[in-house]
Image: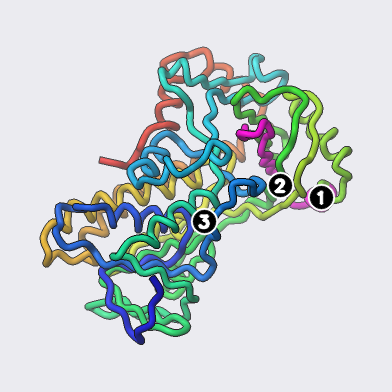
Amino acid sequence: MSVSKSAVHLDVLIVGGGMAGLLLARLLDRPGFAGRQTPLSIGVVESQPPAPRADAAPLDLRVSALSPASLELLAEAGCLSQLTAAVCHPYERMHVWQDGAPDGSHALTFDAAESGVASLGSIVENHAVRAALWAQLSRSANIQLITQTVKAIRETPEVCEVQCEAVELRARLLVGADGAHSMVRAQLGILSRERAYHQNALVAHLASERAHANAAWQKFLPDGPVALLPLADGRSSLVWSHPESSTAELLALSDEHFAGRLEKQLDNVLGKLQCTTPRVAFPLVRNHADVYTGHRFALIGDAAHRVHPLAGQGANLGFRDVAVLAEELGCHLGSLWADPGDPLVLRRYERRRKGDNALVLGAMDGLNALFTSPLANLAGAGLGWVNRVRPLKALFAERAMSSVGRG
């Protein structure tokens, strides 16, 4: 519903209508949440809401590799069943290598069958998830969708005041879910530690001579990793991390020359490649907020942390934030007089998530630095060693698929 009053009081206000923000709103709005008879009043501010997805629409370039734990959250929210096979495609294997061939001595392979699961996760279109969640929220009597832009934020002991273009919102809990360039984070004066990787990620969708066989492929090149993620229509989604200095050249190549260079870089694992979309590049930056919470506010997703895409963990980390924040609020809000902005409750969320996120950010930094260093061959041998030590390999697979951070 739209907001028409000059001031609106809410229990929870989420700024940002990306996947994480909309998922949190949906989880907090579940019937009987925290055993409450009176539902929470929730607002979502998003200046560019997702349009309904047409069945015949081409697949968007922005896709995410969601772990089984993240897919479980979408199922809890009632969203997973709304995603068609065209926009949510499971993958069963992952091949990672550094030199030689994907099945060589410098390679690591994860297989769903070895882990006793149906899949390692799914490649989903971000827009489809947003559209499905937005449609669900629009049908709720407890949620107000405010399609405006935030102009200013002010903290008071009782509420956070958020001034939009045509309405003032007053919330007992403000959640910043507005992405890597978070206005909420900036307005609240929260510092973050940012470091550029001096790499860009080039994305496109590609057709291939050989079937991708529901497998993800990633190779560590001397200048950065390149990955192909399997899509439902038989194509693959490319994510190629490379030095900033080579971006202009890669974008200037003809489709044929670009595909030919990529085939060689990937050791022709899928045979001839063909670009089916334009190529788009964006800068890669590591960022981590100094704090996630304070009096009456919390940060989730890219507003709190931004990670290198080499292991596809960005969206999954955001979903873990959502799961833990919803869990902590669920444990606390069982009584009508409980305050969703209680800093002690929010601090528990921060303690549970910040360490895990820092660990993943550090691991991605280390892997990226290691495989682009003179020690890359040694690191590649390490991949092969992990592949041969089954208990260690199983531990890595479990970590990638599990709901780390939840109770």
- Marked residue nearer the N-terminal end (3 or 2): 2
Q: Which mark is residue 202?
A: 2
> What residue sits right under mark 3 in the picture?
287
Foreground mark, 1 or 3, reads 1
Please report whichever mark, 1 or 3, sits nearer to the chain's N-terminal start: 1
Using the numbered discs, state the Cα–Cα distance from disc 1 to disc 2 in whole angstroms.
9 Å
User: How many neighbours does mark 1 have within 10 angstroms: few (below 14), some (14-19), or many (20 or more)?
Assistant: some
Compared with residue 103, is residue 173 higher up or lower down, i.e. above or below?
Answer: below
Amino acid under label 1? Leu
Q: Sequence-wise, which precedes: disc 1 or disc 2?
A: 2
Magenta residues span 228-249
Q: Secondary structure at mark 3?
A: strand
Q: Residue at x 71, y 52 (%)?
A: 281
Name the mark on residue 251. Answer: 1
**Residue 238 drawn in magenta:** yes
- Residue type at mark 2 is Leu
CB within 8 Å, label 1 to label 2: yes
**Of the residues shown, which amino acid type is indicated by label 3?**
Asn
Q: Position of residue 396 (x, y in %)?
A: 45, 26
In this view of the protein, can residue 378 be seen by the observer? Answer: no
- Is 5 within the magenta? no
